[in-house]
Image: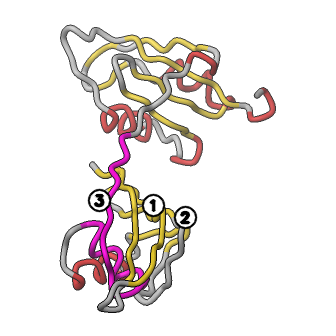
Amino acid sequence: MEDFEIIFFEIDYPQKFVTLQHQHVLGTIMSLGIERDQLGDIVVDNRIQFTLTKQLESYIILELNKIKGATVKLNALPIKDMIQSVENWHSSETTVTGLRLDVVLKEMIRKSRSISKQLIEKKRVKVNHTIIDSADFQLDKGDLLSIQGYGRAMITDIGGKTKKDKVRISYKTLFK
């Protein structure tokens, strides 16, 4: 664990008087000039926790003292005390005409095919952590889609064909 040089913090703040959200913490940290790749997960539950590269430890302790107008205190903790996020994936099944990205994406976000094409052309869709800008990209079982503004989806199974020559697919989504 020490090889990764990651420090883990919990934010202590007056919860009775202020409500902090992920965006408040991220915005404040970014406003300190810290690059996004230096910052790890920000977990917001009953407590707020985040990870950061070890080289920024003393800087963040000195500089991060207010978030959204509330005085905060940072406590360095061992990584084993990190809150594990709970993901609520929702499973769905549908039939599609083919395994093209735009066709499957249309079903997942429940919008028109033209909207799914726009998302792809604007480079707002990743497949397996790679930006895909081609609507005719062929998907496969196990592919993970990240759709900016919606969330994530994964193709869990590709079934047989229907009488009308459509493909049965199962997928799960982790949308907002």
Q: In this view, does 4 lie above or below 140?
A: above
Mark 1–mark 3 Cα distance, whole angstroms, equals 16 Å
Task: Identify the residue at horizontal 58%, vertical 32% (top origin).
Answer: 52
The residue lying toward the viewer, choosing from 37 and 79, is 79
Q: Do the residues labelled 1 and 3 touch (CB within 8 Å)?
A: no
Q: Do the residues labelled 3 and 2 touch (CB within 8 Å)?
A: no
Q: How far from the left and from the top, in percent, is residue 66?
A: 34, 20
Q: In this view, does 47 lie to the left or right of 69?
A: right
> Label for residue 154?
1
Do the residues bearing badges 2 and 1 touch, measured as CB atoms within 8 Å? yes
Q: What residue type is labelled 3?
A: Gly
> Between 18 and 41, which is closer to the camera in this rendering?
41
Q: Determine the residue located farthest toward the right in the rendered image.
A: 3
- Mark 3 highlights which residue? 149
Q: Name the residue under label 2.
A: 142
Q: Distance between the residues labelled 3 and 2?
A: 21 Å
Q: Which residue is drawn at 46% across and 23% down?
A: 49
Q: What stretch is highlighted in magenta?
A: 88-109
Which image quarter: residue 28?
Answer: top left
Outermost residue, front side: 163
Q: Earlier in the sequence, mark 2 or mark 1?
A: 2
